[in-house]
């Protein structure tokens, strides 16, 4: 146990913690924007998976990182548009639309990868590009802090910056006010001239961009190649983080950090030679526990309001 504690309180663990939170935080912020607009987007997992493969294929055949970025974001936007059209225009159930995207992504990525490379498992045969690591001047020379904050992948800093950007969007910009008003009371928002459908379209597309970046980080930063089902439930964990953080940027950040901590812990617990199945389920067990605590808290608040 002392070995576990030493690892948890080490600079290497904190560095890994920040690294692990990136593919959770980005889609969680996107999910928060959708939630604020009154749309629950269950398709985050599928969007991440499709963007992860599109980024690798785009960079491999385009010959540069920008081509991969364009392919990944383009894929995320197209899938988000399909989700928005079916849900907002055709009035399809959002849960069913999201589930359809996840199911489609799981099979289509394997089919496309096999069609292009002849492999069903990984894209190792493709020469793809990855996002660079960034060493922050001055900070990298500070003992301890430099080892924790400097040297991360570019997408990690984008994710941290996105927390501030989403906060500014939701609370300081007219678009954010429209998104929040549509989510709280669409009829009232419509009565004062807010286009509810267009606002929700914008929220879904913004969610797609952030989720696509999270997916591309998995294959172009976290690993450096695409592997089958590599998102591994992070889209669902991001939904839990968005709900537990009450769809506020700071709350989502703290919830994502909590879930990422247990994800990092699963790597550290391997030192105890515990069964791999138990270690693998730890992040998802933490997600269930966090959502249970959140639901109990909300139920108690609702009872207190009714009592008053």
Image (spheres, rainbow, N blue to C red):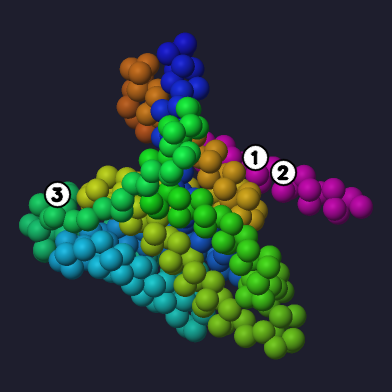
Circle 2 residues within 10 Å: few <14, some 14–19, many ≥20: few
Q: Earlier in the sequence, mark 3 or mark 2?
A: 3
- Residue 52 appears anywhere in the view: yes
- Mark 1 highlights which residue? 293
In 3D space, how far apart are the residues under numbered discs 3 and 1 (Cα atoms)?
A: 41 Å
Dot 2: what SS?
helix
Residue 100 spot, x, y in % from top left: 37, 66
Question: Residue most toward the right?
Answer: 308
Spatial separation of the CA atoms under disc 2 and disc 1: 6 Å
The residue depicted at 39 percent of the width and 76 percent of the height is 82
Q: Residue at x 64, y 56 (%)?
A: 248
Q: Are marks 2 and 1 in contact (CB under 8 Å)?
A: yes
Q: Nearer the viewer, mark 3 or mark 2?
A: 3
Residue segment shown in magenta: 282-308
Which class describes the residues within 10 Å of circle 1: few (<14), some (14-19), or many (20+)? few
Q: Are marks 3 and 1 in contact (CB under 8 Å)?
A: no
Given residues 99 and 187, the one toward you in this image is 187
Q: Which residue is mark 3?
A: 124
Label the magenta part by its dominant secondary structure.
helix
SS state under label 1:
helix
Asked whether the viewer can see residue 183, the reply is: no
Foreground of the two, 141 or 104 = 141
Where is 8 relative to 125, above or below? Answer: above
Query: Circles 3 and 2: CB distance less than 8 Å?
Result: no
Q: Secondary structure at mark 3?
A: loop
Q: Is residue 296 magenta?
A: yes
Which badge, 3 or 1, comes first in the chain's sequence? 3
Of residue 135 and residue 72, the one placed in the foreground of this image is: 135
- Which disc, if any, is residue 297? 2
Image coordinates for residue 228, horizontal then vertical, percent: 23, 50
Identity of the residue drawn at 32% across and 27% down: 276
């Amino acid at each position: 146990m002392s070995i576990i504690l030493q690892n948890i309180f080490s600079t290497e663990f904190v560095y890994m913690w920040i690294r692990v939170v990136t593919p959770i935080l980005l889609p969680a912020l996107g999910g928060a924007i959708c939630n604020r607009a009154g749309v629950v987007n269950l398709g985050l997992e599928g969007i991440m998976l499709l963007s992860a493969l599109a980024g690798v294929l785009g960079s491999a055949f385009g010959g540069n990182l920008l081509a991969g970025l364009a392919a990944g974001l383009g894929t995320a936007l197209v899938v988000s548009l399909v989700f928005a059209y079916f849900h907002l225009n055709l009035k399809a159930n959002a849960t069913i639309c999201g589930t359809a995207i996840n199911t489609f992504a799981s099979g289509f990525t394997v089919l496309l990868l096999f069609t292009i490379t002849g492999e069903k498992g990984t894209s190792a045969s493709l020469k793809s590009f990855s996002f660079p690591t960034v060493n922050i001047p001055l900070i990298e020379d500070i003992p301890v802090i430099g080892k924790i904050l400097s040297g991360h992948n570019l997408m990690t800093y984008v994710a941290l910056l996105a927390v501030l950007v989403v906060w500014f969007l939701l609370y300081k910009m007219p678009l954010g006010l429209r998104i929040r008003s549509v989510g709280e009371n669409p009829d009232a928002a419509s009565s004062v001239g807010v286009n509810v459908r267009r606002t929700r379209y914008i929220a879904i597309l913004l969610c797609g961009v952030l989720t696509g970046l999270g997916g591309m980080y998995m294959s172009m930063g976290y690993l450096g190649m695409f592997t089958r089902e590599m998102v591994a439930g992070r889209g669902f964990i991001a939904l839990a983080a968005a709900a537990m953080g009450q769809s506020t940027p700071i709350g989502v950040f703290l919830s994502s950090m909590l879930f990422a901590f247990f994800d990092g812990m699963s790597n550290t617990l391997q030192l105890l030679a515990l069964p791999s199945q138990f270690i693998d389920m730890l992040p998802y067990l933490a997600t269930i526990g966090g959502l249970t605590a959140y639901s109990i808290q909300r139920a108690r608040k609702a009872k207190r309001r009714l009592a008053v």
